[in-house]
Amino acid sequence: MKISVQTVLNLLHNIISPISVDLVNHLQRTTLIAWYLSQRAGLDKAGMSNAFLAGMLHDIGSLEKDRERLAPGNEGFFDGHEKLAGSMTAGIRFLQPVTAILENHHTEWSDSGEKTLPLVHHMLHMADTFELFLRGVSGDYSARRERIIADFFAQSERWPASLEAALRGASQQDGFWFRLGNPTLSQVLNAISPLQDQMLDHHDFLEVCQLISKIVDKYSSFTRTHSASVSHVAAKLAELYGYDIDMQEKICIAGYLHDIGKLFTPLAILEKQGALEPDEYAMMKQHSYKTLVMLHPITELGDIVNWAANHHERLDGSGYPFRLGAASLDIPSRILAVADVFTAMTENRPYRQGMQSEMALKILREEAANYRLDRDIVTLLDHNIEIVKPLVAMC
Ligand SMILES: [Fe+2]
Ligand SMILES: [Fe+2]
Ligand SMILES: [Fe+2]
């Protein structure tokens, strides 16, 4: 499996979008501005890539459960979110070159002769500051460009001369302003991205899953814990089944991703105590379909998409969203389904205690006997319960 860094960033934005569409818009516009600055301020190829990468992610530390605080420019948006971005991206190898940029993207430039940060840090800071400044501007940007630029430099801090010249130069171009107002800016970024040729393999993508986990956690902690547990249980079942390490890791990825569609489910339904009303249940059931919609465009993920999205399908065709039957459900899909049910029954939720694994196994055996879950996979779990059990909620 090979997947471009740009595709991964698009997926991360799709995951952040249901939590805060405003934040995604800020990340995208900041990236565009940083790209213009990097073109004009003489950064080398690596510097341009890092500016783009850092722009796309720089404020992920600001994700909060309290949606009121998410809007860029709000008080609270800045409380330590730079450091949090650094800790959220720790351990992800391809992000290491930009960790320091994320952590310093609010550090002001000083021309006092003290040791300063590399130019790319200040570039991102300028792009970020200018994007937030533009939020206070109404009317057509391009018609007001001179006023905008004059006001920005009059009101903001001091900047390195090369960055000031770069922004003034970019502002001469109509396209700069048109692109900033483009409602489908992601398409523009895909076209200009220097990250389309930087490829990741599934080991790298497994690390990205850790970041996805942390983003999901900002919305729903138990969904994050559940997804991580399902990934561990599914990977162990894959190993016990005899799959090689590559397959185990791909099944592990499917486990991390299987419930990302829940980001579209309102928390009031996701964490409701007691039975769901028919309308609420219908909305809840949409989550695995939303997982499919989010992942389907990423052709690089291959079969992983279906393994993740099929976890509520059943062998007898009674599942959802497509009522697929045994003929359409391959072994990894069946592993995911068993791992999901076992984990869901045995883990604690905000509204109930998890059940004992013996009781969960009894239900799983009945599900297998009724030809809803795969008998062989359930037997595998049954025979190895002492190995698999501790994997639930271990993270
Ligand atoms: Fe920020
Ligand atoms: Fe920002
Ligand atoms: Fe699910």
Image: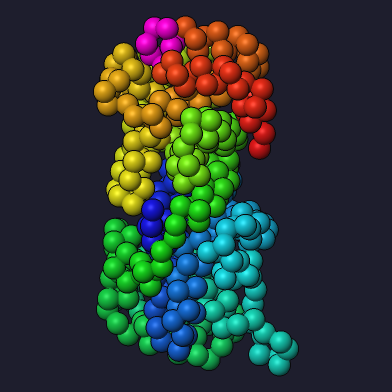
Q: In the image, what residue occupies the spot 56% across and 24% down?
A: 343
- For this rendering, which residue is in front, 377 or 60? 377
**Quadrant into which the C terminus falls:** top right
Colour scheme used in the picture?
rainbow
Q: Residue at x 35, y 67 (%)?
A: 196
Q: Does 245 appear above or below 93? A: above
Question: Outermost residue toward the right?
Answer: 114
Horizontally, residue 57 falls left or right of residue 185, namely right
Taking the image as drawn, is residue 279 in sight?
no
Based on the picture, tell me whether residue 370 belongs to the magenta stretch.
yes
* Residue 32 picture quarter: bottom left
Indicate the position of residue 82 as horizontal and vertical percent values: 63, 62
Is residue 28 located in the magenta-colored stretch of the structure?
Answer: no
In magenta, the rendered stretch is: 367-373
**Residue 96 position within the rendered picture, expressed as x and y whole percent measured from the top left:** 59, 66
Residue at 63 percent of width and 15 percent of height:
357
Front-most of residues 149 and 87: 87
Quadrant hosting residue 309: top left
Q: Give the image location of residue 124, x and y in percent.
A: 52, 73
> Does 317 appear above or below 159?
above
The picture quadrant where one finds residue 42 is: bottom left
Residue 258 located left or right of residue 381: left
Q: Can the viewer see residue 53 in this picture?
A: yes
In this rendering, would 93 be left or right of 149?
right
Of residue 288 and residue 179, the one placed in the foreground of this image is: 288
| Residue visible at 66% across and 90% down in the picture | 111
- Where residue 277 sits in the image (x, y, percent)? 42, 13
Q: Is residue 221 above or below residue 277?
A: below
Q: Nearer the viewer, residue 314 or 158?
A: 314
